[in-house]
Amino acid sequence: MLGCTYALVALGMYVPFVLAGTLSMAYSTYAAIGGYAVAIMVAKAGLPAWFGWCVGPLVSAVLAVLLGWATRRLSGFYLVAVTLLFAEAFQSWIQSNDNLTGGEAGFGNLPPVHFFGWSPSTVQFGIGAVALICSIAFLVERLRFSPWGVLVRAMREVPEAVEAAGARVPTMQLAALAIGAAIGNLAGALFVSSVQSVNPLTFTLSLVFLAVFVPIVGGLGTAWGCLLGAAVITELTLNVHALGQSGMLIVAVGVLVILLLAPRGVGGLIGSSRTLLVRLAAKSTARNG
Amino acid sequence: MGDEVLLVGTDLHKAYGGVVALFGVNLRLSAGEILGLVGPNGAGKTTLVDLISGTQKADKGELMLANRRLDGPASQRAGMGLARTFQRPQLALELSVLENIMVGRAGRRHGSAGGVIWGAARGMFGRAVREDQLAVIAIAEELNLDRLDRPARDLTLGEQRLVEVARALAQDPLVLLLDEPFAGSDASGVTGINEVIRMVQRRGHGVVLVDHNVDLVSALVDRMMLLNLGRLVFDGDPQECLSSAEMQQIFFGGGTAPVD
């Protein structure tokens, strides 16, 4: 389930970062809004969880547009720094706001998810989560090759030319941020629905620091690379116990090794070994025939 | 058509710091007309194109396109029917030839917040974009561009210019601004660009062609404007322009600015 969360955060970052080239680091905030939206709807308002699933992405998208608008003149390091600070500030706000977010304690013992009387088992929930991620990756890939995606990718390199072709570059950048935030929000909603509790420490910046590597490890090119990267990162963090509780360190070293051995990520490695196999197969058929 | 005026510029001024780039230039382009804009380096040709397209803002002066004021950002002017190429080609090098031309086709649909949101929704959930691709492929075929899946990085300078022209043509513009489209082009590139200019003219639309190769320009255009040091020094028939005293003075005589 942690892998699914990372995959969704990474998919959320993929749209503005890999496609449009704007690196916002406030994704722990969007995930937290997603998680808290579910928790507050269920625990405070007594509404079904899916209502939180629908409201959260809208709230996150609006916040992303406001934050993107406020930081529109920043780029590179300063954009990263400001969005990081924002994420920190938002976490403190959650901690101090006892009425709305339950303060330090957050919400525990949320009832299990159910849709119109049907409560999925853990396995069913897992299958549903994977299906959700695959369909989002599919939609993001469609978006990448649509005229919209072409404009967004072009404006990363030649904003002047895209503007001269009639597209509003600032508006498109904000839209990319909003879509990313909405997807990142689903990561939080999924995680909280799964573990049935949330507190201010559920979504911290370490989530962002790990998620930032996911597209690189998986292969920068495609949205499917995010899924692959999330699987690798989660495996390294949780299941490799070479140095005790040193998940982060192992991830950092692992990322460096992967980047040295396969500059195009694990996805790129699989891609090129497939090409190699096809070429070898073709050669041997040619020899035999 | 015929005498219908497409583009009018009145008393255009632009200075960069203390350096005057344009000083009181007037300009008129009729429907179906090809206007040549020539002059030595630093004469203000590209500045004039930038002011028209909205890439830069004029310090003073007024621009009208088909009786509507041109004063918004570049994207808004493109929506009104302007398209341009750049002196240094502005192609997304990571994207394919087809995708670069697609930018021209898709741009105007994403000129407002509503258009951007609708475009994203259509991209994710809408039908396939086959129609757009076919339109782009048709334009590329007219310009004899092949292997459209090549990344723009692999193109020669001449091919890059041709792709830029194709992108501008995909906008189906009322007025097409070509900033030095022939520099670095080979023979087939020159033919392709000539073809585009004729195509826009046949549709009854206008072309502004900028170059410092006066012989090449004079053979193509209906009217020629000669700029020097930010001022308009001649406006009229191309042949008369070539033999005018001003032209002799600038290009062959005393030489008030370097020629390359």
Image: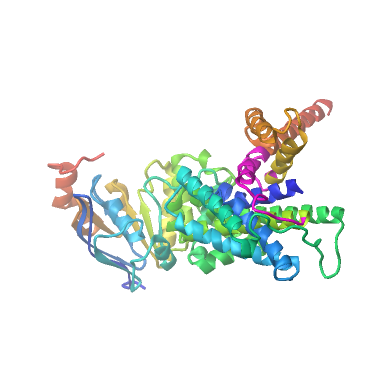
Q: Residue at x 34, y 67 (%)?
A: B70
Q: Quadrant of residue A241?
A: top right
Quick check: is A136 in the magenta stretch? no
> Is B64 placed left or right of A52 in the picture?
left
Establish if B211 lies above or below A272.
below
Indicate the position of residue B163 as horizontal and vertical percent values: 48, 49
Is B62 displayed left or right of B149 in the figure?
left
Q: Is residue A121 visible?
A: yes
- Find the residue positioned furthest to the top: A287
Q: Position of residue B92 (x, y in %)?
A: 50, 47
Can residue B99 be seen in this snapshot? Answer: no
Estimate the x, y position of residue A129 in percent, counting from the top left: 77, 54
Nearer-the-camera pick, B10 or A192:
A192
Quadrant showing the C terminus of chain A? top right
Q: Which region shows up in magenta?
A: A196-225
Asked if residue B260 lies left or right of residue A125, the reply is: left
- Which residue occupies the foreground of this view, B131 or A126? A126
Left or right side of B232 for A70: right
Q: Is residue A206 magenta?
A: yes
Picture coordinates of residue A151, whole percent (x, y) = 53, 55
Q: How many marks?
A: 0
Q: Colour scheme used in the picture?
A: rainbow
* Image: B1 above or below A83: below
Q: Which residue is more in the foreground, B217 or B258? A: B258
Identify the residue shown where x is 85% and y is 60%.
A120
